[in-house]
Image (spheres, grey):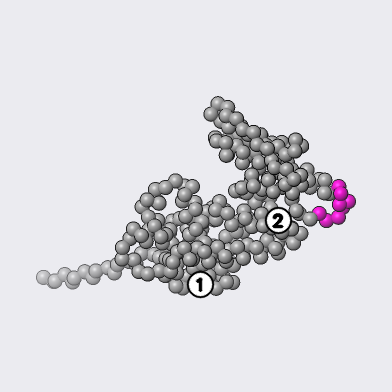
């Protein structure tokens, strides 16, 4: 009777390392830098025995600086006719929490980010800030790992499609502030808001110097005012652009609206 040869134990398969989507070209040499950006301070505080990583908050601070430089340089090149005021407004929209958290989701960052138990249960509004902060920390980590050129390429890939003026104004996270800047520059007036609650819905009317007016509806006063401000910005820009075109008599108009 032949003895059965002992079965060879199958080697354990290594779990595949988590990767970001390939189209963003985000590959690290130093994986500790990547982990430093993905481990939120709340997770570190609740987890004992973690190895020492670079400081998340310092990475976020440095990443914010790199991001602003890349965005400013791109805007300067893409909109040569824009004045300082318009460039500043476009930059503030691009680096806003709203846009950064949106891009963080596009590159699947929340899937890899580790949060503390308490923070992971919070509402999406608070998570959006964490996603934006982690994205800035990731920028810094990638910069230290790959250098400026690769980091700039990565960021321009992430922001591809966002460098559109009309789209950016629709995504403006602070339409009331933008409307006030326009109103003070052209009429030295502050927009007037009038809101009222009708059937569990807020209705807001905003006007400038009794010349321009727009209305917005929302679940609360803030939402109604923001919608009204966004609509009035669109109306005012269209009217001012027509006026400047008539005055310029065919000359190239500076995009200062």
Question: In this view of the protein, can residue 123 be seen by the observer?
Answer: yes
Residue in the foreground of this view, choosing between 257 and 149: 257
Q: Is residue 56 above or below residue 227?
A: below
Q: Earlier in the sequence, mark 2 or mark 1?
A: 2
Residue in the foreground of this view, choosing between 195 and 98: 195
Residue at image location 34% in from the left, 66% down from the top: 50
The residue tagged 1 is: 144
Residue in the foreground of this view, choosing between 214 and 161: 214
Query: Which residue is outermost to the top?
Result: 199
Residue 202: % across, % down: 58, 32
> What segment is highlighted magenta in the picture?
246-253
In the picture, the disc for residue 238 is none
Residue 113: % across, % down: 43, 58
Q: Nearer the viewer, mark 2 or mark 1?
A: 2
The residue tagged 2 is: 85
Q: Secondary structure at mark 2?
A: helix
Residue at image location 49% in from the left, 47% down from the top: 125
Query: Which residue is outermost to the right?
Result: 249
Q: CA distance from mark 2 to mark 1?
A: 32 Å
Query: What is the chief secondary structure element of the magenta stretch?
Result: loop
Residue at image location 42% in from the left, 47% down from the top: 122
Q: Is residue 230 above or below residue 68?
A: above
Indicate the quadrant containing the N terminus: top left, top right, bottom left or bottom right: bottom left
In which image quadrant can residue 38 be found? bottom left
In reply to whether residue 248 is colored magenta, the answer given is yes
Count of numbered tags: 2
């Amino acid at each position: 009777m032949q003895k059965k040869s002992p079965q060879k134990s199958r080697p354990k398969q290594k779990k595949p390392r988590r990767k970001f989507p390939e189209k963003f070209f985000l590959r690290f040499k130093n994986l500790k830098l990547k982990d430093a950006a993905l481990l939120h301070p709340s997770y570190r505080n609740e987890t004992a025995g973690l190895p020492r990583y670079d400081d998340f908050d310092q990475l976020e601070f440095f990443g914010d600086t790199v991001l602003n430089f890349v965005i400013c340089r791109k805007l300067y090149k893409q909109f040569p006719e824009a004045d300082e005021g318009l460039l500043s407004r476009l930059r503030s929209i691009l680096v806003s929490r709203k846009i950064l958290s949106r891009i963080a989701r596009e590159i699947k960052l929340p899937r890899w980010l580790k949060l503390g138990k308490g923070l992971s249960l919070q509402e999406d509004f608070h998570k959006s800030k964490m996603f934006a902060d982690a994205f800035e920390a990731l920028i810094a980590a990638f910069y230290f790992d790959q250098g400026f050129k690769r980091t700039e390429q990565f960021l321009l890939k992430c922001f591809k499609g966002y460098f559109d003026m009309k789209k950016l104004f629709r995504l403006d996270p602070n339409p009331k502030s933008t409307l006030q800047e326009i109103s003070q520059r052209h009429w030295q007036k502050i927009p007037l808001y009038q809101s009222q609650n009708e059937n569990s819905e807020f209705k807001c009317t905003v006007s400038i110097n009794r010349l321009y007016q727009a209305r917005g509806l929302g679940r609360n006063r803030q939402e109604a005012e923001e919608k009204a401000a966004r609509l009035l910005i669109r109306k005012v820009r269209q009217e001012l652009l027509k006026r400047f075109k008539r005055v310029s008599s065919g000359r190239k108009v500076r995009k200062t609206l």
